[in-house]
Image: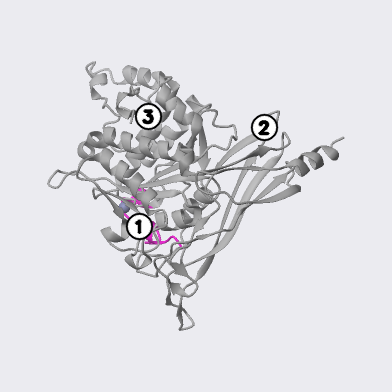
Amino acid sequence: MRLTDQPRSKRRLVVAAAAATLALTVVAVPPTVGAAESSLPSGNTEYRTLADYEADMAELATEHPDLVKPITLPYATTSGRTVHGIEISRDVDVDNGKPVFVNVGMHHGNEFPSGELTMEFAIDLVESAAAGDPYVTRLLDEARVVVVPVVNVDGFVRGRRQTDTNTDMNRNYGLGWLPISTGGAAAWSEPETRNIEWLLSTRQATVFNTQHTCIQVVLYPPLQLEAGPAQDVDRLHALASQVAAAYGPNYKALPSAEDYETTGEAIDWAYFATRGLSITTETCPDAGVARTYQTQVLDVYDEHRQAAFTMLETAADPAEHAVIAGQAPKDAVLRITKSFDMYTSPYLQADGSTRPSSFTTTLTDDLDIASRNGKFEWSVNPSYRPIPAYQASGVEGNQTGFYTEPWILTCERPDGTVLQTVPVNVDLGERVTVDLKECRREFHRDRS
Ligand SMILES: [Zn+2]
């Protein structure tokens, strides 16, 4: 690990103009403003409000348009609030097929440090890259980072765990879902949950982290003992162990089911749908230590930084995903899609029978071919999808296999006309070259 030798940007986000205004208006304050700044990338000394999060994200995008692009998640919350995020990469506007690290906070609206740590790392990445830090620059050349610091905005505003339908977002994801009291009216009933479904279904999230408090643990699928170990248990455990080690010797890495059993959590659907390495990171001060901003944000940020860099390095590592390569016509759009049914746990249905419900997951992502020669390298999750325990027939634990369904790759005109369709099977760590001659020929034919 090279993490500890890296210089760390601590530039305060507040712009000079704001500081000047402050200096003009608060004349009675002695000149100790600098001392009030913390060692965090933002310099903050207290928890953000929702407006603070939104201002910080907007400011990063405005000040660093080459590195930061705003994202608006598609579904407004139950109470009509919009969920915002940012994408961070070098040349962030160029669609270049980089693997993606999706990092989210605040599934639970009262776990304030989870949003803070997520946001601070985003600022750190951007400020470090803007300052020319070679390590961060390399990682942002190789990968894209998507940050949504507050996914449960309604819960955050009210300072409570659940959404405004009194649903625990992290019990509402469809895979293995059960109608427990906080599970929501149905699998995927919550717009906040569907936002994350959208986020992970429309990009190649090779690593997905959801940040929580307050345990000292890094969790990976499955959620229930009956499901048995995930197919990628070794890879999941390796990542979770590295992340846990970054936080300190008390932190443990283990399957979520061994912590306590739940259903309908983000990481289970995320891993079994996309095969991206999906973890839940819970931070908490040592037993007996008061839970304050100081102990839960300031005191843990350096460790969190190292943990998040571990996740980002793993997301960027070609051994941890797959690559589709080839040559397409300049200005063409490539699209990969797959669509499949997944299942909840069996539960008592309205018709009196006990059986699972099914839902369809559709993964789709596109790549704009902008380079003159049309050559592309597209980092994707493997086409081989782990068979989950949750089946139409009920819970069938200890699955070891993978579905061999391919990515369906289409080569299209910008107007959506499909010129060629190629099924692509590509495994973990593999690089497959697709032949798009037909698309190249057709693309230019009607143009002349
Ligand atoms: Zn939580």
Q: Which residue is pictured at 53% across the width and 26% down the height?
A: 66
Quadrant of the image occupied by residue 248: top left
Q: Residues within 10 Å of mark 1 (few under 14, many from 20)?
A: many
Amino acid carrying mark 2 in the image? Ala
Where does residue 197 sit, x and y in percent of width and height?
Answer: 49, 54
> Colour scheme used in the picture?
one colour
Q: Where is mark 2, residue-wise? A: 370
In terms of secondary structure, where does tag 2 sit?
loop
Amino acid carrying mark 1 in the image? Gln
How far apart marks 3 and 1 lie (CA) works out to: 29 Å
Q: Nearer the viewer, residue 194 or 272?
A: 272
Q: Is residue 338 left or right of residue 443?
A: left
Where does residue 341 sit, x and y in percent of width and height?
Answer: 55, 65
Q: Residues within 10 Å of mark 3 (few under 14, many from 20)?
A: many
- Please tell me whether mark 3 or mark 1 is closer to you in this view: 3
User: Is the CB–ligand 1 distance for label 3 below 8 Å?
Assistant: no
- Please tell me whether mark 3 or mark 2 is closer to you in this view: 2
Q: Nearer the viewer, residue 326 or 371?
A: 326
Residue interval drawn in magenta? 155-174
The numbered mark, 1 or 2, whose residue comes first in the sequence reads 1
Q: Where is mark 3, residue-wise? A: 124
